[in-house]
Image (tube, rainbow, N blue to C red):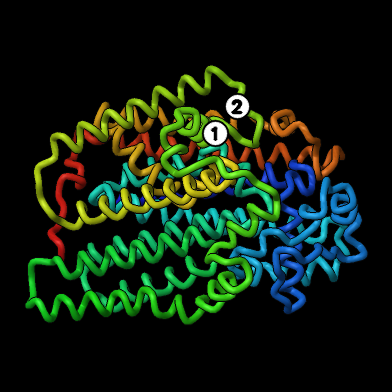
Amino acid sequence: MRAGTLGIERGGLVAVLVAFFAASLLFALQMEPFYGPDESAHLGYAHAVASRRLPEITDAVDPPTDASDWRATIAGAADREHRSVWVANHPPLFYVAVAPLIWISNGLGRMDGGLMFVRIANIAFATAGLAFTYALANLITGGSRRLALTATALAGFLPLGHATFATGMNDGLGFAAATAVTYGAMRLVTNGFQRTDLVVLGTASVVAAGARAASMFIAVLVVVLAAVFRAMRPMGTRPARFRDAATVLAVGLLPAALTFGWFYARSVALYGDLTGSSFLFEYFDRTPYGSAFDVVTTATFWSDAYEQFTVSTVPGSLDNPAASFVASAFGIAAVLGLAVMAARSRPRWDSTTACRVIGVSVLAATVAMMVNHVAGGGSAHARYLLPALGVIATYVASGLERVWSGMLPFAAAATLCLWPAHFLPQRVENEIDVGFAIGSSPLAAGAAVALACVSVVASLAALTAIGHDVTHRSRRRDVASRSPPLP
């Protein structure tokens, strides 16, 4: 690849990250404090950790005296359960990471108790997740930087991501950790048994174990797959291959178990399982939906999840027939493209195939976790699919590429790019329909306009980088057709 094209694509990646951060920050600043029931509980967890205490699910939230907005939210909670730190079943890494922000907030006496700081931290972690998405997509596509950039743009322009990662929750770290550990496993099977690759996988696995239970399960899955693929490589003696596989398992799992295994053991002792889900279902009097089979055979489960994932911003914003039609058209085209790829691909086992198997496994595991959550009585919110966002975006881009090379992936990214333009700038308030958190002063309005403009300009810059590569494809051969064997 020529240096000029590589520079344009790297510039496009930076543009995607800037566009995502600006759009998400615009949401964070304009959403009413404590939008939804989750933010208060997550903030309560962060304050408990900042006070050097690990909370339990039934512990009451204890806002600082100065946090008048937070105290008003707690006072207006519908029941005792929503006045507790009911998200204490999550591992503590995110809350440890934001503890310094809570100390700063307490020193400033902020009325929101530091909620805005936690929202910005969530956005920052999600931005890191997009960077790992680019690296992951580059491996799944066999080195096609154009498709990797397109996949990152699809993930970065997704409206659900802007709204979810802009809240004071830990979804951003969960997305980043799951994507990073998936990339680490793919990097290991692509590059071989290099010390740096082992360090990347082991470090990402530790972060995944401490981020969310979902990312922990994904870490275990991809480490095991990386070890299996290491044992399957064609070169080396059988004892050497098995020894290398055992090393992958030890480096990928042992540090994570030593760092956060105690927390999951604590969850089993306190709540009866690794995730605390069964305890929470009883705590909130949730009625089980049925078996996992009942969920997966319910058509509305799949249609609602897809529509939420592709169209919605915040819960209740699904009444948009035109957007639903466009999302369905792109989705059908991507599925057809992937089906054609699978049917026409020649049977071979190389590093790209291994990466694709890891990606499919991560997606299947993420869907399975969501299905089990719904079957037990949990809500079927599409944000539970966000740990696999990078993988999903990569396969969508690959499927669209197979239907109409270059043009259809670009069209999908361009369609999502309309999102920040459509909500420039005050329309975000109309979509959320709960008012501005930053007020209506001229300075606040100017900040909203500036953020919206930054998001739109950066989005257009990213599209320009993708479009440049599409228009110059006829002059060079895409590297995605060449995949190295398993090292």
Residue 347 shows up from this direction:
yes
For label 1, the SS is helix
Q: Residues within 10 Å of mark 2 (few under 14, many from 20)?
A: some
Residue 8 shows up from this direction:
no
Report x, y in % for residue 173: 55, 60
For label 2, the SS is loop
Contact (CB < 8 A) between labels 1 and 2? Answer: yes
Q: Is residue 72 above or below residue 266?
A: above
Specify whether 258 is left or right of 36: left
Q: Is residue 371 above or below residue 334?
A: below
Identity, as a three-letter code, of the amino acid under mark 2: Leu
- Residue located 56% across and 70% down the image: 268
Q: Nearer the viewer, residue 366 or 233?
A: 366
- Residue located 45% across and 75% down the image: 256
Q: Is residue 171 above or below residue 397?
A: below
Q: Quadrant of residue 401?
A: top left
Identity, as a three-letter code, of the amino acid under mark 1: Gln
Q: Separation of disc 1 and disc 2 at Cα? A: 7 Å
Report x, y in % for residue 118: 70, 59
Q: How many marks?
A: 2
Q: Quadrant of the C terminus?
A: bottom left
Identify the residue under disc 1. 308
Q: Nearer the viewer, residue 1 or 330?
A: 330
| Of callouts 1 and 2, the N-terminal one | 1
Identify the residue under disc 2. 318
Report x, y in % for residue 159: 56, 37
